[in-house]
Image (cartoon, grey):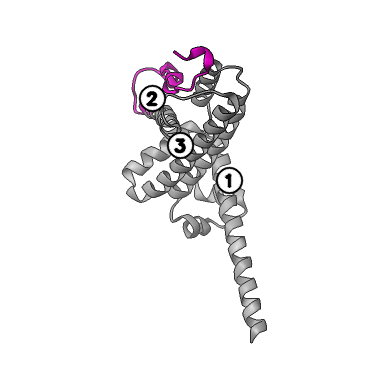
Amino acid sequence: MEKKRTEARASSVKSRDRGRATRRRLIEAAAQLCTERPGGEVSVAEIAHAAGAFPNQVTYYFGSKDSLLVHAAFLGLLHDARRLERLGRQAPDAATFRRNVARAALAMPSLPSAARALAAAVSRPELAPVVDRHLQLLFRQSERFARQLLDGRGWRARRPLAVEARTFWSTALGAVLLVRAGAHGTAADLDLAGALTIHDEAERG
């Protein structure tokens, strides 16, 4: 009897591991297809084929294609945010940091997809918890990076780092949403660097 219970537990663990692996492949495949086809329609069949999965597994693991695309959009945004952090660490001073990070953030290929995910959550309330979960992860990741940077450089911020991170990303995503909504101009017209208050000794007053 004990042997059967052990075998059943092992089988259950393997099944969960396979499920997590399939889920991860679907998210990564969707993210890759959305990057290759910005603004274009991506079908469930294409995503499943790229992930080596079955189309009905999209519904099984995510509930809908839109939910999967939200996960994929924010996976891409989190990856781009990591690259943004590496760029930020290379800045010799705080002014260069603000300028370089702002410029690179607005050019991130994942930003339009994340903005579309935000817009989708407005019309599809069931997507809002998924969007919020990913946004909170993004904010925490950026806050952690900023704290490490400031501690290592002796820089300061003029407001709490949680507010700094939320303000920066809200401004960047809002800029893209405005452009998508037809507002005159481009995201590059925005002073995203001005949304950052991180400064160094030379700028203290």
Residue 65 image point, x, y percent: 46, 50
Specify few, some or many for label 3: CA neighbours under 10 Å numbering under 14, 14-19, or 20 or more.
many
Q: Is residue 150 left or right of residue 1?
A: left
Residue found at x 54% / y 38%: 78
| 135, 14: nearer the viewer | 135
Callout 3, which amino acid?
A: Ala
Which quarter of the picture shows residue 171? top left
- Secondary structure beneath dot 2 equals helix
Q: Which comes sooner in the sequence, label 1 or label 2?
A: 1
The C terminus lies in quadrant:
top left
Q: Position of residue 125 (x, y in %)?
A: 33, 48
Give the alpha-carbon distance from disc 2 to disc 3, as whole Å: 14 Å
Q: Which mark is residue 179?
A: 2
| Label 1 – label 3 distance at C-alpha | 15 Å
Q: Residue at x 43, y 21 (%)?
A: 187
Residue under pointer 3: 114
Q: Is residue 201 magenta?
A: yes
Residue assigned mark 1: 28
